[in-house]
Image: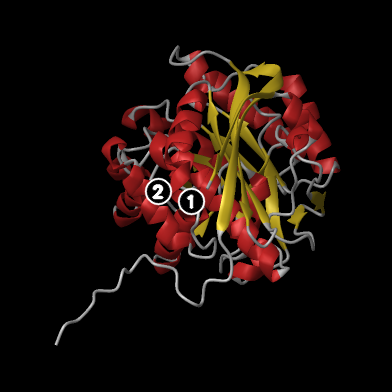
Amino acid sequence: MTVTPVDPASNGPATLDRITGVRLSSVTLPLDTPISDAKVFTGRQRPMTEVAMLFAEISTESGYEGVGFSYSKRAGGRGQFAHAHEIAPVLVGEDPSDIAKIWDQLVWAGASVGRSGLAVQAIAAFDIALWDLKAKRAGLPLAKLLGAHRDSVRCYNTSGGFLQAPIEEVKEKSAAALESGIGGIKLKVGHPDSATDIARVGAVREHLGDGVPLMVDANQQWDRAAAQRMCRAFEEFGLVWIEEPLDAYDSEGHAALAQTFDTPIATGEMLASVAEHADLIRHGGADIVQPDAPRIGGITQFLKVMSLADQRDLQIAPHFAMEIHIHLAAAYQREPWVEHFEWLNPLFNEHLEISGGRMHLSARPGLGVTISDQARAWTVETAEVTG
């Protein structure tokens, strides 16, 4: 008896649609003011003046279109675009609903450059676009497709608390953010003079009052001894968390801080794969995990990190890209926080509603955003891939 092998990658009768084309856009988003955190004050980076965005628009035979994006700060935008352009032909002809399969195909198409960092950040734009498309096909907001636990999430603002801003400006912007409906305030710390950090946090705490949720972020700039001292000093301020007190890959050091102090330790935004998050969680290195969907390869990978965090009863607080993360946070069992940045607002025609300390889901299907004319005007390179 002769058995004819079946190609496991073939599309069968259940296939309802096929991808016909992919449009890639590299967009340079300028910032109104150069931004400095601790990495600038320690000489490791220059002030940030722009964000490189990678947009992917995926079209299908049935007329559906999904929009996704990734990003890079200071460097890497051209690399993301180039890698995405090289592997984009993999998508053409595939069933857009087979998202996990397509993710594997994309990562193997560029296997020689690895499964983390820039390689998966390029894939993220495609993956997010496919999830957007899938939710649009269902006529549902992405959160509802995933299975939402809530229709709004707690949100905090970071953009007013950077280190280049004088403390009076930080106090003014923090109060204005709360007035606009934001639920919490995050301040940058990690100044070379630790007394400056303590004074700035103390001034904002006094200005806003004890009842306002307040977080701080050291952007990986302390060594273990300094982190111990600063975590101890910050205990009096009743912070929601202390973020990235150590190098992002120092899971053991973060675990020691989490076990020693009452204030929760948050980290994870700089990790660039599920495997790196698994290592952090396995070591107990975070009370609050901060994955970033564009940085770890998209929504498919983010859902894996959510599952790992859930198994350990951990909280999550996704980093940046609120247009994506509101949906993922709404689908997490434990009440999360989502980071509010108004920086990306000019890129989209639609904006999220903020009120009562919360960010609210809209009824729009998919991610609920479309690319603005301003984003098109800031486009520096495009590429189209078709069958």
Disc 2 marks a residue whose amino acid type is: Leu
Disc 1 marks a residue whose amino acid type is: Leu
Q: Identify the residue under disc 2.
A: 106
Instruction: Left or right? Give the position of 335 relative to 300.
Output: right
> CA–CA distance between discs 2 and 1?
8 Å
Q: Residue 142, percent across and down?
A: 65, 62
Q: Residue 298, percent across and down?
A: 50, 50
236 or 272: nearer the viewer: 272
62 or 300: nearer the viewer: 62
Q: Residue furthest left?
A: 1
Q: Callout 1 environment at 10 Å: few (<14), some (14 to 19), or many (20+)?
A: many
Q: Residue at x 34, y 40 (%)?
A: 110
Q: Which of marks 2 and 1 is in front?
A: 1
Residue 244 visible in the current orientation: no
Q: Residue 261, percent across and down?
A: 42, 47
Protein image colouring? secondary structure
Q: Identify the residue under disc 1.
A: 91
Residue 244 - label: none
Q: Which of marks 2 and 1 is nearer the N terminus?
A: 1
182 or 2: nearer the viewer: 2
Q: Which residue is drawn at 36% across and 65% down?
A: 9
In this picture, is 304 found above or below 240? below
Mark 1 lies on a secondary structure that is helix
Residue 153 occupies which quadrant of the picture?
Answer: bottom right
In this picture, is 248 found above or below 184? above
Q: Are marks 2 and 1 in contact (CB under 8 Å)?
A: yes
